[in-house]
Amino acid sequence: MKTFLTFTLMALITGQSIGQSPHTKETVKINGIDIYYEVYGDGEPLLLLHGWTQSSRFWSDYIPTYAPNFKVFAIDLRGHGRSSELTDDFSIEKSATDILKLLDFLKIERAKAIGLSYGGLVLLQLASLHPDRIESMVLIGASPKYDGAENSNLDKTFSYENLPEPFIKELKETHYGGESQIKALFNPKLNYKISIGDENLKAIETKTLIVNGDRDEIMGIIPATTLHENLPNSELWIVPNTGHIAIIGSNQDNFLSKSIQFFTKE
């Protein structure tokens, strides 16, 4: 179990390097908290939503490919990076509302978006509540139903006390609120749950690319097939020999190519 924990956590932070410089960096007050974002490139808006314990820096190696094609908004989700730390009243729906209000602040009527893992849950929740605001989306390692800390694969394994020291060191480099902010991410009281029924999924007409590793050790593969069966305008890409973060390493170039093609095709 310890080996599994270390592997999974280190996979979550893979890619959090520093890439090209943004032409805008800003922290804005949204729903009473600070939300940090960076802007790159020009063109149609593309939102990048990172996974749990990550930050907008996860996308550093992807942005140079996206920026020539889109106006990229790399966002630190609530509780992550330079955004405000999580509080006990957190929910996936609140995080989705943060993105909605940020779109309003930026005067963006509709956007393309990519959501990875936790970011995929936030994006799916946003699309279910406000499908008119998301033109097309890529969901990576996402699920319409997730019970958070009660998930049998995570539960007590993902407690702050069980974190490997290298992982804590990496988190401190990307989370600017320090230990307090990091501990808040692992608060067992937090509501990381999401539950979107089949009928609600069928009402989401947003064009969607669903990406999932065939060896996803956190979500498994059933949530991806459930999404594909119920989202009426969706495509499914099962990435072979790959775990939860299915777009890193040798899969990165293929993902970049497929996602750009998906967003730009008629």
Image: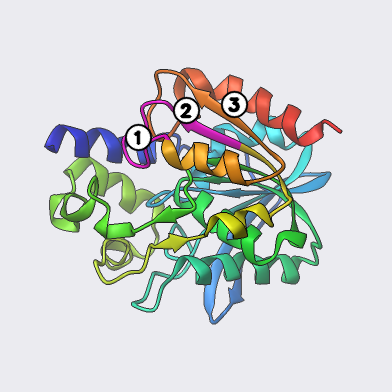
Q: Which residue is mark 2?
A: 248
Residue shown at 27% from the left, 72% from the top: 189
Amino acid type shown at disc 1: Ala
Amino acid type shown at disc 2: Ile
Q: Is residue 13 left or right of residue 228?
A: left
Along the polypeptide, which appears first: circle 1 or circle 2? Answer: 1
> How many C-alpha atoms fall within 10 Å of the one at disc 3: few (<14), some, or many (≥20)?
some
Residue shown at 26% from the left, 43% from the top: 167
Q: Which residue is mark 3?
A: 255
Residue closest to the eye, 25 or 263: 263
The magenta region covers: 210-221
Q: Which residue is mark 1?
A: 11
Residue closest to the eye, 76 or 174: 76
Question: Label 1 to label 2, Cα distance in Å?
Answer: 9 Å
* Residue 42 quadrant: top right
> How many C-alpha atoms fall within 10 Å of the one at disc 1: few (<14), some, or many (≥20)?
some
Asked if one can make out residue 55 in the rendered structure from this viewpoint, the answer is yes
Above or below for 183 versus 152: below
State the SS at label 2: loop
Q: Position of residue 185 (x, y in %)?
A: 32, 62
* Residue 106 quadrant: bottom right
Quarter of the image with the C terminus is top right
Task: Label the magenta part by its dominant secondary structure.
Answer: loop
Label 1 with label 2: CB-CB less than 8 Å: yes
